[in-house]
Amino acid sequence: MSEINLAAIEENRARLQAEYVHADRPESSARGIHHAALICSDVEQTIKFYQGLLEFPLTEIFGNRDYKGSNHFFFDVGNGNLLAFFDFPGLDLEPYRETLGNVNHIAISVTQDKWEYLRGKLDAAGVPYTTASRTSIYFKDPDGVRLELLADQLGEMYGTKVM
């Protein structure tokens, strides 16, 4: 890892915030995220993890129109949002790794009570995790995708309004 100039980074962040973050910003042209689509190595393993462990109901599974033999399936993560997956049998894909343009993590909003309940389920299942606060827990799915369960209110992060 190369050395970084933190003072210059902070100065640039302040410049970007002053130039682009406005209290009187217009309403977004989007209605929300319909779904985020990830790739998994095993459909049933993924269903057991997301529906069985995390309790995100599987809503649909059908064939992927772009790749014969592939499945496209969806989990309800609340508030009208879906987390989707593809499997690509026969493509011999490499394991997850962080690269430019890739997903760093997916933060999923839960209540504080549900956060504590799901943390207990992660413990019981032996899923390793780290906590960043009393509202944030990070762990990986069976294919290495990093997930965060976040008990902050939607539009807030660690006490800061981000919406």
Image (cartoon, grey):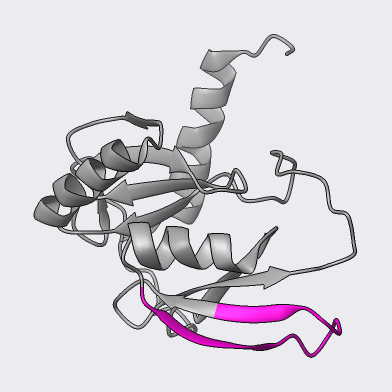
Residue lying at 23% horizontally and 40% vertically, measured from the top left:
158
Q: Which residues are magenta?
A: 57-73
Residue 128 located left or right of residue 64:
left
Outermost residue to the top: 3
**In magenta segment, residue 130:** no
Residue 96: image location, x then y, percent: 70, 44
Note whether residue 33 is visible: no
Q: Quadrant of residue 138?
A: top left
Residue lying at 52% horizontally and 15% vertically, measured from the top left:
7
Q: Nearer the viewer, residue 162 or 15?
A: 162
Residue lying at 16% horizontally and 56% vertically, measured from the top left:
114
Residue 48 located left or right of residue 93:
left
Residue lying at 69% horizontally and 9% vertically, measured from the top left:
3
The quarter of the image holding the C terminus is bottom left
Residue 89 located left or right of residue 56:
right
Q: Nearer the viewer, residue 11 or 125?
A: 125
Residue 104: image location, x then y, percent: 58, 44
Residue 36: image location, x then y, percent: 56, 70
On screen, residue 109 above or below 35: above
The quarter of the image holding the N terminus is top right
Residue 59 located left or right of residue 85:
left
Residue 111: image location, x then y, percent: 15, 58
**In magenta segment, residue 70:** yes
Note whether residue 57 is visible: yes
